[in-house]
Structure formats: C-alpha cells, structure tokens
Image (cartoon, grey):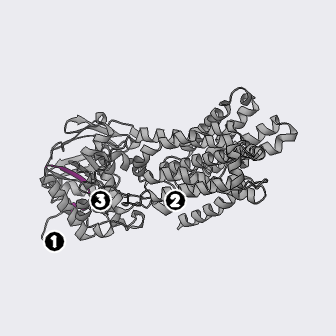
Amino acid sequence: MSGAALSLREVAVPGRLHPVSLELAPGLVVGLAGPNGSGKSTLLAVAAGLSPGAGRGRHDVRWNGDAVAAIPALERGRRAAWAPAEARFEFGFTVRSVVAQGRYAHGDDGAGVDEALARMDLLALADRPVDRLSGGERQRVLLARALATGAPLQLWDEPLAPLDPRHGLEVLALARDHARAGGLVVFSLHDLRLAHGLDRVVLLDRGRLCAAGEPAEVLTAERVRTVFGVDWRIEPGPTLSLP
Amino acid sequence: MSTTRPGSVAGFAGAPLWIACAVLAVLAVASLVVGEVALSPARLWAAVVGRDELAATILWQIRLPRLLVAALVGAGLASSGLVMQAYFRNHLASPGLLGVSSGGAAGAVVAIAAGAASMSLWFVPLAAIAGAFLATAAVLGLARRGAGTERLLLAGVALSALLGAVTSHVLTSHATLYERNGQILFWLLGGLEDRTWEHVVVAAPVVVFAAALWPLGRPMDLLSLGVDEARSLGVDVRRLRWALVALSTVLTALATAVAGTVGFVGLVVPHVLRLLVGPEHRRLVPLSLVGGAAFVVGCDLLGRCAGGVRLGVVTSLVGAPYFLWLLRRAER
C-alpha cells in the first residue's frame, strides 16, 4: 500500500483551528487527542479534503505529496477514507448496501465488502436497515464502509466512543493491521491511556497544535495537567485485551 | 444474495417497474373509456381507425391530450419530489410543500397576465421555470441543506403563502370578472380541464429531464446519507447538487405550467415507492416516473368518476392524510 503520507501546511479554519502544520508518514497509527472543542473533528475533516467552516481559511493538505484540492473527486474516494463521529441515516439502506457505498469510487465493484462486514462483526446485521441500529452498530457500519474503500489513508472521528470493549479493541487491531500493510490511520480519541499505546500522538488544545510525536514525549504529566486539567501517572492496573 | 451489486436482488430488480407500467396502462385505457360520453373499447378502436367521427373527436381532441398531460405532470412531480427528498435528506421535502410549485404557478400567471402567452408557446413554461427557480433559491437560502423538518416546512409554508398571494393578486387585477374565479382556482388548486396538444408539447420535456436523472441514481444514494460522507467517498458533490436542483426545479415548473399547483404528488409517490422497493435510487428514479404518471392519471380518473372533482382536490384528499400520518411517524 502506498500513498498514505499526510501533510498539512499551515491549515487553518476561522474560529476553529489556528494554523496547524503536521507531517505524518505511512505505517503509523496516530491518535488525535484534545479536550472537547479543541478542533479534532475539524482537523480530521480538513485532512480528508472536506471543507469545514464553509471552505473559509487555508486548506493546504497533501496526500503523499499531491495537493488534495487538485485531486479529482473520484480519485479522492480511492485515496482517503473518512468516518464521521456519528451518522444520521435518514433512509433505510441495508447495512450491506451502506458498506458497499465504500466501493463507489471503484465503480461499485463490491470488492472487499464481505471482508469489511466480517471484520466489523456485521455479517449477522448485513440485511438490517441502518436506521434501526444502535449507536455502536452504526459506528461499526461507518468504519466498515471506510475500510471497504481500501484507501491507504484512514481518518476516523472518535471511532471508539460508542463501542463496547471488544469492538473497541477490534478497531485498534484493525488500525494496527492497516498500518502494518503500509497505510496511515489517524483517529481522534478521548482515552489518553489508549493514546499512550499508539505510534504517535497529536495533541490539540483550543484550536492549536500543542504537541506531536511519540506518546511518551507528548503525554507528559505537566502537559496533561495543563491541557486536560487531570493528573497523569503511570502505574500497573487492570488491562483488557482480545483473547 | 450476490454481494457485488448492492440493492439489485437477483432476478426481481425489474419486477416493480413492470408492475407499475401495467398499472399505468390499465389506468390509461380506463381514463380513455370513462367520461361524459362513455367510449367502449370497441368504440375506441373505431375512433382510432377513423370509423366513428364523434368518438374520434372525443379521443383525439379531449381524452388523449388530457391523459398525456396527466401522465407527464405525475411523472414530473414525482421525480422532482424524489430528488428533493434525497437532496434535503428529508422524507417530507416535496415540490408542493417547499413552495416550488407555487413559484412555478406565480411565474406562469405573471407571464399570462403580461400577455406573453399569445406571443409564444414557450413563454409560459419559461416563466414558470423562472418562478420555480426563484422559489428554490429562496428555500435553499431559508433552510440550509439537510435542514430539519420544521425549518424546511415552515420555509415552504411561508413561501407558498407569499407566492399564492402574488398569483391571486395578478389574477384579480388582470383577468376579466367572468373568468377570474376559474383562473384562480386553476392555478392554486391545479386541474386538467381543457388540456390540448399544446399543453402536451409544453410538458413533453419532462420525459427528457426525468431520464437525465437516471445516471445520477447511484450518487444520489450516497448524497441521501450525508453531504460530507458522499464527498469523502468520491462523489463530486458540488456538481451533483447543481444538477439535482436544476432538474427537480425544471420538472416541477413544467408540470405546474400545464396543470397549476397539484399538491402532494411529489411527496406521496416517492415515499410509497420507497416503502415498497427500498431506498436505492437507481430503482426509484424510473419507478417514480412511471408511478407518478399512474398516480395522477388514477387521481384524475377518480375525480372524473366522482362528477368532476378537480385534480388538485383529489390529490390533496389522498395526500394530506398521508402527509399527516408521515408527520406523526417522523415525530417518534
């Protein structure tokens, strides 16, 4: 898998994001952390080539060196996938057909749809209308659709928030596999303990890039207290893992 | 089930369309037979081959143009409603409720009052298109994309009232006393009385514009689940939305130019079809065209059987209760 590098140059959205520059290499799982309203969703949307804030501000985003603004619409759908934090499905498409929408940019060839459904544990729900799912199930549908695109760059907005422990760990395992295959996964999250176990952490605070790099360097006790207002210490405690 | 083609359940994908065509055909024949002078199928045939002159006059000059206008109006309004529902991601969006029909009627009436109708056959429909686009622009401004039901419907109500007032005022100040009331009724309530081949010609492009929706069915699926989602999956959202706005507005305008504001067709038909065959637009686009035609031909037939009840009254009698039921369901 190639073409997963992401670079933001002085990206800004008025009122939401001060100029942010960021370079992320392929093969990484990157956690995007920050308090509520710190600009995580905005940053992900800009990185995905969407235009939050009605397109105002500067959006110099490059995927593998190519300016996103110059990439044709259809090709964007093949190169990057974006999963929003929540979805309001107004119409009763089946789970399978929503996941299959991930193949739109590939001429609706249906490749990998079953694998994505299986990976997100959705095979049993495949023929269920999406407007009759729980919040966690909807989140898994969004992730399965992002996965089905086969895009090297995966941008997920708080994928773990509504998930139960097992499905949450599955998503982390999925991110690892994707990165190992040469892709780049960037997702926002609130659980700093989880962020500590990722390859990189990007920390946002009130619309500014606060720190980015190795988790141990970014998540220091002092910085966590300043940004989040909580105490941070590392000591042995209960652990969850997939059997 | 095959996983390669979402939504096309093997073998039965075309069945609803054929059923809709059959229903339309039956209703069409019935609407040629029924009337003040009943034409039996045998007399219809005699009229077609030219052996029965009275029957031929009734068929060619009255019933057939009326039937075709009814079918085109239904096809146009239903297709337009389908597009608006996908665009606004709202089951309740439709040309009548959003005021686009009223815009078309106001445009047509202004053109007629200005005497443009006598200059060219195309002035009235063009004026209707202009009026409908004004209304569409106003709705888009008042209720942003994907707007909540309340905002959308309130914007539509206000707009309809305003444009209806324009229509009524122009008619009261221009039409002669004798024809005034009938004219106001026609443009505010819709009707198919005295439709001629000229009206058929004006409404005929409906077929072209509805067919132009065909290739947009798949991206409409994606758009109907979210603008940003569709964009991230590779849809050229800006172009798609322009195409959808333009097509749905023109479809409503053409229908309105020949039949006045006929309510609820664009709401009821796509919604019923969605309940029957699911939300995939590649199936809903052709089905709405045929189903809309069948619905309006059927409503017109019903009104004529009931002793000349106007088309707009019949569609409202059918559609308003359905709308209220929908509104109740949406609240839950």
Q: Is residue B31 left or right of residue A183?
A: right
Q: CA distance from mark 2 to mark 1?
A: 59 Å
How far from the left and from the top, in percent, is residue A72?
A: 31, 36
Q: Is residue B23 left or right of residue A152?
A: right
**Subunit of label 1:** A
Q: Is residue B104 left or right of residue B331?
A: right
How far from the left and from the top, in percent, is residue B86?
A: 48, 51
Residue under numbered circle 3: B3
Q: Secondary structure at mark 2?
A: helix
Please report the bounds of the magenta region as a residue range.
Answer: A182-192
Residue under numbered circle 1: A239
- Frontmost residue, A156 versus A150: A150
- The kind of residue tagged 3 is Thr
Q: Is residue B5 magenta?
A: no
Q: CA distance from mark 2 to mark 3?
A: 26 Å
**Crowd band around label 1 with a 10 angstrom C-alpha radius: few (<14), some (14–19), many (20+):** few
- The kind of residue tagged 2 is Ile
Residue under numbered circle 2: B19
How far from the left and from the top, in percent, is residue A80?
A: 26, 46
**Subunit of label 2:** B
Q: Is residue A220 visible?
A: no
Residue positioned 69% across, 54% down in the render: B42
Comparing labels 2 and 3, the label whose residue is closer to the camera:
2
**Subunit of label 3:** B
Task: Work out whether A144 lies above or below B143.
Answer: below
Q: Quadrant of the C terminus of chain A?
A: bottom left
- Frontmost residue, A184 versus B114: B114
Task: Work out whether B266 lies above or below A238.
Answer: above
